[in-house]
Image: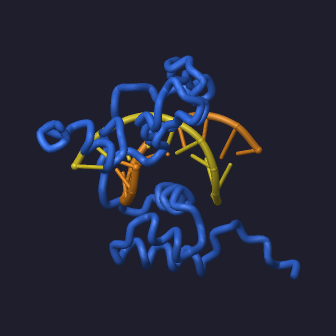
Chain colours: A blue, B orange, C yellow
DNA sequence: CCCTGATTCGC
DNA sequence: GCGAATCAGG
């Protein structure tokens, strides 16, 4: 074990990479097949100069956002620390009681609430109207 | 939200 | 050069 000082990408893996890539597999699939992250796959592919297939994104005029000082959304200065972008904030119980809490369920894409509560919020209030 | 890939930056 | 992080579009 001394003549082995290859980079992470050996001919073997490069072979699989190129082969799978040529087969039309996606970066994620190849990454899983080789046991590497998809970034590693696309990174290597890009570096090798292999023919990329899709370009869903177009080169924008934006000079890429500064990664370090990524400004966070300064909103909701409430005690909602566990606030995620997909957390349903549907009120559970009574806001004036101590057992008041939020749904916490994963919200639907583009919806402020989860599937169940989204239906409630966007209902025609017809059947709900009692 | 999921997925896709591209590009840039840090190590 | 490699990998992660980020951005961008469907």
Among the 4 quarters of the image, the one containing residue A29: bottom left
Give residue A15's position: percent from left, percent from top: 52, 79
Residue at point 43% right, 48% down?
A106
Compared across the picture, whether A42 is left or right of A6 comes to left
List the single residue furthest toward the front.
A130
**Residue A59 image point, x, y percent:** 34, 37
- x 56%, y 75%: residue: A34
Locate residue C8 relative to residue A102 in the image: left or right: left
Instruction: Tally the marks.
Output: 0
Which quarter of the rendering shows the C terminus of chain A?
A: top left
Tell me where residue A80 appears, x and y as whole percent: 57, 28
Q: Is residue B7 left or right of residue A97?
A: left
Q: Nearer the viewer, residue A102 or A49?
A: A102
For the point 52% across and 72% down, the residue is A32
- What residue lies at 73% left-to-right and 71% top-to-bottom? A6
Residue A6 vs residue A26, the one in the foreground: A26
| In the image, residue A85 above or below residue A18 | above
Quarter of the image that includes the N terminus of chain A: bottom right
Residue A20 % position (x, y) = 43, 76
**Residue situated in front as seen by the camera: B3 or A51:** B3
The answer to which quarter of the image holds residue A50 is: bottom left
């Amino acid at each position: 074990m001394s003549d082995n000082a290859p980079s992470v990408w050996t001919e073997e893996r490069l072979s699989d990479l190129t082969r799978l890539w040529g087969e039309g597999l996606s970066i994620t699939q190849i990454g899983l097949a080789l046991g590497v992250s998809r970034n590693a796959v696309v990174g290597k592919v890009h570096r090798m100069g292999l023919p990329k297939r899709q370009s869903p994104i177009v080169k924008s005029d934006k000079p890429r956002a500064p990664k370090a000082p990524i400004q966070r959304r300064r909103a909701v200065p409430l005690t909602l620390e566990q606030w995620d972008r997909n957390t349903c904030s549907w009120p559970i119980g009574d806001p004036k009681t101590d057992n008041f809490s939020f749904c916490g369920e994963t919200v639907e894409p583009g919806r402020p609430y989860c599937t169940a509560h989204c239906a409630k919020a966007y209902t025609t209030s017809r059947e709900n109207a009692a």
